[in-house]
Image (cartoon, coloured by chain):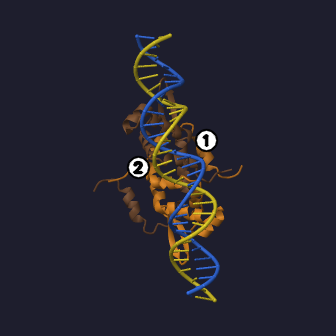
Chain colours: A orange, B brown, C blue, D yellow
DNA sequence: TTTGAATATTCCTTGACTGGAATATTCCGT
DNA sequence: ACGGAATATTCCAGTCAAGGAATATTCAAA
C-alpha cells in the first residue's frame, strides 16, 4: 500500500524557526551540538531539545563519538517531501499563467 | 537579495492534519467551503478557520462567486518549497548509500 | 576517583493553537 | 424588505509546545 499523504511529524518539526535554521546549517555537513549552538547563538539545552524533536521525527540522526554527538541530516524525509510535492505537479502546470515572473525571480539568485 | 531560508508561515500552515487534508483535496481542483467540509467531515466553522490560515499563508486563494467561495491552491508556495528542497540535493546525493531500497520503495506505487 | 567538558533531561511558566457553540455577514430569490 | 443558504467571525475553554534555569548523565584524562 502506498501512502499519498505527507508525514505530519516531519512537517511539524520543520515548522519552527530554530529547527529550520539547524536543518539549513546541517546542509553543509555534520556538526556537534556545541557547534550548532554556537553558530546559531542558541543555549545548549535549547539546542538539545530542538535536536531531539528533529531526531524523533527522522530528520536528523546522531553519530556518537565519546562525549560528543555529531548530528547530520537523514535523506529520507527530504526525499519523501520531494515525492509528495510531485503530486502537485499537475496543479502547478495548470496554473502556469502569470507564473513566469515568479519562476524567474526564484531562479535569479545573482545580484543585479 | 535572495532568501535561502524556507518560509515558516507556509510550513506551519501545512503542519496540521486538517489543513494537509484540505490541501491534498484541492490538488484535484477548486472546491467550495461546503464541499470541503462535507468531504472531510469537518464542521463549517472549522473548515473556514483552517482555510483562513491557509489563505493568509499564501497556500490557497478564493474566487468569490456570490455566496460561495471556490478555494484553490496557489502554485507559488509549492514551487518555493520545491526550490528549497533542491538545496539539499548535495546532501542527499552524498548519502545515497543504503538509499536505493528506499527509493524503490517510494517509486513502487503499484500493488504486488 | 575526581574533575571538567559535552550533552540530555526535568520542572515550571507562559503564549499560541485548536475546537465547539453561538452569532454575524453577505448574497440571492421571492 | 424578508427568509434562507453559504461563509466568516467571535468568545471561551482546553491543550500543547517553547523557553529559562537548574540538574542529571556520560565520558575522557589525570
User: Where is mark 2, residue-wise?
Assistant: A5
Compared across the picture, whether D18 is left or right of A56 comes to right
Compared across the picture, whether C27 is left or right of B41 comes to right
> Same chain for marks 1 and 2?
yes
Compared across the picture, whether B21 is left or right of A54 comes to left
Any part of residue A52 in sight: yes
Please say if the residues under marks 1 and 2 sit with CB atoms less than 8 Å apart.
no
Q: In which chain is the residue bearing label 1?
A: A
User: Does B52 appear above or below D16?
Assistant: above
Depth check, front residue: C7 or B112: C7
Which of the 4 quarters of the picture holds residue D22?
bottom right
Badge 1 or badge 2: first in the primary sequence: 2
Mark 1 residue element: helix
User: Where is mark 1, residue-wise?
Assistant: A101
Q: Residue furthest left?
A: B112
Q: Quadrant of the N terminus of chain A?
A: bottom left
Depth check, front residue: D29 or D21: D21
User: Does B67 appear above or below B103?
Assistant: above
Amino acid at each position: 500500500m502506498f501512502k499519498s499523504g505527507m508525514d505530519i511529524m516531519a512537517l511539524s518539526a520543520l515548522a519552527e524557526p530554530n529547527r529550520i535554521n539547524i536543518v539549513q546549517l546541517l546542509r553543509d555537513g555534520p556538526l556537534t551540538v556545541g557547534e550548532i549552538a554556537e553558530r546559531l547563538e542558541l543555549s545548549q539545552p535549547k539546542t538539545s531539545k530542538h535536536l531531539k524533536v528533529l531526531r524523533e521525527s527522522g530528520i536528523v540522526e546522531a553519530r556518537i563519538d565519546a562525549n560528543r554527538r555529531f548530528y547530520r541530516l537523514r535523506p529520507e524525509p527530504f526525499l519523501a517531501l520531494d515525492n509528495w510535492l510531485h503530486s502537485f505537479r499537475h496543479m502547478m502546470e495548470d496554473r502556469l499563467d502569470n507564473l513566469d515572473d515568479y519562476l524567474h525571480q526564484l531562479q535569479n539568485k545573482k545580484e543585479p
